[in-house]
Amino acid sequence: MNKLAEISKKFGYEGRIQIIGEGHINNTYLVTPPEGHKLIIQKINRQVFRKPEELMANLVKILDHLAQNKYPYRLLRIIQTISGEPYWSDRTGFWRALEYIDNCSTLTHTNDMRIARMTAEAYADLIKTLAGLPPSAIRETIPDFHNPQKRFEEFIDAVNEAVDNRTDHAGSLIEQAMAFRGITHQYAEIVANMPLRVTHNDTKLSNILFGKSLDKVVAIVDFDTIMPGYVMNDFGDLARSICNTGREDEADISKVSFSTTLFKAISEGYVSTLKDTLAPKEKENLLFGVRIIIYTQFIRFLCDYLIGDRYYRITYPEQNLNRANVHLKLLLDLQGKEDTLIEIINEV
Ligand code: GN1
Ligand code: MG
């Protein structure tokens, strides 16, 4: 029996197994039995999530909290192994299973204001419902995940340890990453007295399950990086994902720009949902969150390209270079549109 079928059996499921999802880190499979419910099995990447047991303990707490606090979307139920464990761990890896929510659509990209707004409202609803869960109750699944200063240090190491002739190839990107470095100091000042709360930390469009006809949000998925964080980072990553007029790894850079109309849609959705939840300092720095997350993602992709693609899954050789390039373009475009964006965010 092949390994995946064997793992699936540990959770009491047998059936057709296929790879699904858009994730860059974990491996996700769908098990379709001849009849009855389908199952998701995931192999957690232990290089990235060093303590998957803590990740699972977080997940249990988060799901419980949401279930008990009128969370308006469906939750992914954890499916235990037949011997009643919340996961299966062996020589081949750390495996967990989740209930599959059928009849949904996912998107990696949109130019529809309604979808942008719905997505923003959903991620804002999550923040709102998690507001009652103390950050100290949740472990950091990846330490310094959104710490731009740490990311910058990693980037400098990557420049020094770069493989092949990748520093030549990425010369102008490296220069730009250095030129924007001041933003990491600004971040440190801003977060010095910013409230910590429990945040999602990976608020991209593809982590939303919509109804088949894209009429509503059914569920938010990928709770693995839910941990103590700053709301501006969630808003920033949402903007990075939704407002990009191109794909995350767009090779034709002329297709990439930061859409102010989509920004207006997500700002309205996010702020209207959270107006009574957020502190003034959190509201004031939402736009800074966009800048810092786009910068951080830029150097994270660049870093991985330089060290030889060891972190993110790639499907073709220069994908991480493309991803970095896209984020630099977004950062530059954002700079040019700063006044309009300030106006939009102040208005909402
Ligand atoms: C990774 O694996 P996935 O696709 O859920 C990454 C996020 C990035 C995202 C970019 C643990 O998320 O931080 O924003 O790629 N997750 C981790 O698409 O590094
Ligand atoms: Mg993720």
Image: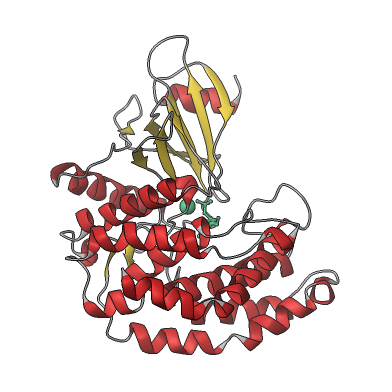
Residue at x 19% of width, y 41% of height: 67
State the image quarter where residue 342 is shown: bottom left
Q: Is residue 52 depicted above or below 289 in this figure?
A: above
Q: Residue at x 41, y 37 (%)?
A: 210
Viewer-closest of 213 and 144: 213
- Residue at the image position 75 percent from the left and 57 percent from the top: 251
| Image quarter of residue 130 | bottom left
**In this image, 311 relative to 269: left or right?**
right
Residue 42: x %, y % from top left:
48, 38
| Above-or-below relation of 237 to 162 | above
Using the rendered image of the protein, determine whether residue 199 is visible from the camera's viewpoint: no
In percent of width and height, residue 197 lies at 26, 67
Q: In this view, does 158 lie to the left or right of 74?
A: right
Seen in the picture, residue 76 relative to 114 is either above or below; the reply is above
Residue placed furthest toward the top: 34
Find residue 167 and report its horizontal and vertical position in percent.
Answer: 79, 76
